[in-house]
Structure formats: structure tokens, C-alpha cells
Image: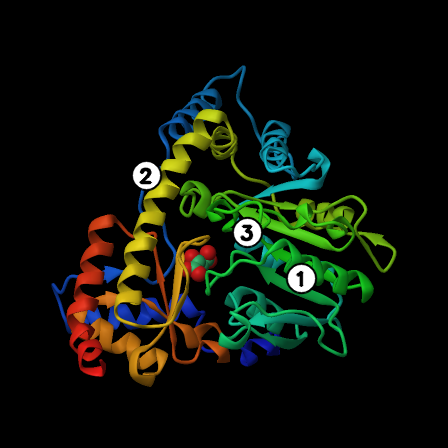
Amino acid sequence: MTKINKNFSNLGENYLFAEIARRVNEFKVKNPGRELIRLGIGDVTLPLAPVVVEAMKKGCDELGVKETFKGYPDYEGYLFLREAVAGYYKRFGVKIGTEEIFISDGAKSDAGNIVDLFAPDNRVLVTDPVYPVYVDTNILSGREIVYADSNEDNGFAAMPGQTPPPDLIYLCSPNNPTGTAYTFGQLKAWVDYALENKAVILYDAAYEAFIEDEGKYPRSIFAVDGARRCAIEFASLSKTAGFTGTRCGYTVIPLELEADGMRLRDLWYRRQSTKFNGVSYPVQCAAAAVFSDEGLSQIRENIAYYKENAAIISGTVKRLGWEYTGGVNSPYIWFKCPGNTGSWEFFDTLLNSAGVVGTPGEGFGKNGKGWFRFTAFGSREATASAMNLLDNLYRSDTVRQK
Ligand code: MLT
């Protein structure tokens, strides 16, 4: 008789963004023709950069010619792309070998699949609020999860010191959902803690391209001394270069990183070659083009556009007198719902009164209760109209309070 993984019963009914999609679809059925503005899931809206599209087309053309046709790609990704990624890291002063880089279909898959490397009895630490993938994938594999609070008291930057210490530590900087980023000093404290306790840090750098002050906030955990002995880094072209639909990311595992006497880089190669057949050639060509001088300059324009959206959102939230974080080194603005409203209650109010979709903070953990997240990845028009609607809905409250 087939038995299912009983850990499924320990998950919430839906993945957070699937739950939001379900509620929005229900709303659409009840309100046909009603226009919605979506600032919920962090999905990009600008097209791929021209140099990236050209490279992808060229890759397709090569597949249509006998002499340049390619079958299965290398499990770890084509060398030309791994060299491009290594060159990208070099630009912000981090030396990574091509044999330490693994190309994949995105950071979400890698952050979820990495759990295959670790025994079920590892204790896992996540910061709360947290990107739900880290939690759900560990629930599915039956691991104990402990939470480090990120809240108003610590500026939404949880710090180490938990006892007993965890074996695995998930960090995300710039953070999803709070938009805060760890400074060099804060990240060094986590690295020291991990080294002291022989723990591995699983570091999600999916939003590194949004960091403005590189002197203060590292773009990679490997810019911090000691991290090569305790960290794995996930990164992605989804938010950096608009690849949410195109799919390409990479994971970096330093050669010297070991646990239980095993080299984690080798285990990951073994895992990937067993379960994953790589990213298609045209997509890898497109990804390599992102890291060219021209590609980087074109994607910077898109990032600047999203940052202007972020400034419009944070400007509105600030005018309304609501506490907020993020929006500078991050595409997310995380703010306190007005008048002690609950996150899901605020979600419903916004949806019903303004047709605006956001993400309830509570969906990211207990410290998200009463908080809310907007993404800056919408179009300028959508972002500006959503903020006008918000202003109209709540300005009178603000004036009354004064
Ligand atoms: C988010 O909105 O948090 C992200 O887009 C989700 C993801 O990257 O999977």
C-alpha cells in the first residue's frame, strides 16, 4: 500500500503566494471586470534587456544547426556561464572558482532542494518573518525549526546567540520580506557563530543587485571573512535581470566547506547530477549576456526603474505616517498596517476598497502579524495609481489623528 509523506499534514493548507492567488481569483469571480493592481508576489514587469534577448535568440539559432546543436547541458552549467558568474563576483571583490558554481533554474529550487544534503535530525534556524520556502521544505523533511525574531526592537535584523545552537541557519539579505539588509559587521557575527558551532549558513542573496551602499552591506556572504568555511550562497537572475519566467539562478558552494567530514560541493554535484538535467542552452546564453558590460548596464536601468517605484511606495507610506522598512536596498517595502489592523484584514480591505493586492506580513511568520509587504516590481502606472488609492483611503485618518 502506498503511504504518503506524513509531513505534508504539518504544512499550512497552501503555499503563501498560492493562497493569495486563490483569494484574488475568488474576488475576481465575485467582481467580474474589476481592475486589480498587483503588488503582492515579487514578479517583475519590465521586459528582458535587449542584449539578453539577442543572446537567447542566437542560442536558439545554434540549436537549429547540425554543427552547433547541443543535447544535455553539463549538470553544473556550461563553463562559459560559470566563468561569467565568477567574473560578476570579481566585480564586487569576491573570488569564486568556476568549480564552486552550479547553474540552476532559480534560487527557490536550490534553497528548497539543498535540504537533500542534510540529515533529518539537524535543527534549522530561520529568522521570523521568513521566506516560506525555507520553512516548508524543512517541514516536509521533518526537521525541527527554531525561530530567531526579527522585529521592531532589532530593526528587523535577527542576530545570533540562540542556545542550543542550530545546525543549519537560513539568512536572506537583502531580506524577503522586510527589505532590510545585514551590514558587514552583522553578517560577520553570524559567520563567527556558525563557525563556532559547526553550523552551515544557507544564504539567500536573490536581491543582492538592489544593494546601494556596497561599503556597508555585502553583496555576497563570501565578502565576509570565514564564510567560505561555513556558507552556501543562492542567487538568481529572477529579480536581477527579469528572469522570473525565463528561470536561471546559481548556487555557490566553496571547495573547503565540509560537514561531517564530507565536502558539500561534491554532495551537491552528486545530488544535481542525479535529480537535475540542467538549464537549457539558450537560457544559459541569455544569462551569460546579463553579466557582460552591456548586459549589466541594461539591467541597471531596470533596477533603477524598480527603485523609483520603491521610492513612490515608501514616500506614500511615510506620508501616511506608517512605520516601514526596506525600499532602499531592496524591492520590498514592509510596513505596519494602520490602526492595529491585522495583516489579512488589511489585505481584504485593500482588495475590496481599492482593488490593490499586497502580501500580508503574517504569511511570513508570527513577527509579520500586523505588517504588510508591497513589491516595487509593478509598472510605474500601476504603482502610482495604487499609491493614490492608498492615499485617498487613509489620508483622512492621518489628518484626523493629527
Ligand atoms: C516573493 O514575492 O516573495 C517572491 O517573488 C517569491 C519567490 O521568489 O518565489
Along the line of sight, which residue is nearer the eye, 354 or 90? 90
Ligand 1 image position (quadrant): bottom left
Q: Which residue is mark 3?
A: 107
The label on residue 47 is 2
Residue sitting at x 24%, y 49%? 380
349 horizontally vs 242: left or right: left
SS at circle 1: helix
Looking at marks 3 and 2 on the same chain, the residue that comes earlier in the sequence is marked by 2
**Quadrant containing the N terminus in the rendered view:** bottom right
Q: Amino acid at mark 2?
A: Pro
Looking at marks 2 and 1 on the same chain, the residue that comes earlier in the sequence is marked by 2
SS at circle 3: helix
The label on residue 115 is 1
Q: Amino acid at mark 3?
A: Ala
Task: Using a 10 Å C-alpha cutoff, classify the residue at mark 1 as few (fewer than 14 neighbours), some (14 to 19) or many (20 or more).
Answer: some
Question: Is the residue marked 3 within 8 Å of ligand 1, measured from its CB?
Answer: yes
Whole-percent x, y for residue 241 in the image: 43, 40
Residue that protrudes farthest toward the top in the picture: 67
Nearer to us of marks 1 and 3 is: 3
228 horizontally vs 179: left or right: right
Vertical comparison of 44 with 190: above or below: above
Whole-percent x, y for residue 115 in the image: 67, 62
Quadrant for residue 25, please give it.
bottom left
Question: Is the residue marked 2 within 8 Å of ligand 1, measured from its CB?
Answer: no
Residue sitting at x 41%, y 37%? 300
SS at circle 2: loop
1 horizontally vs 346: left or right: right
Whole-percent x, y for residue 153 in the image: 53, 77
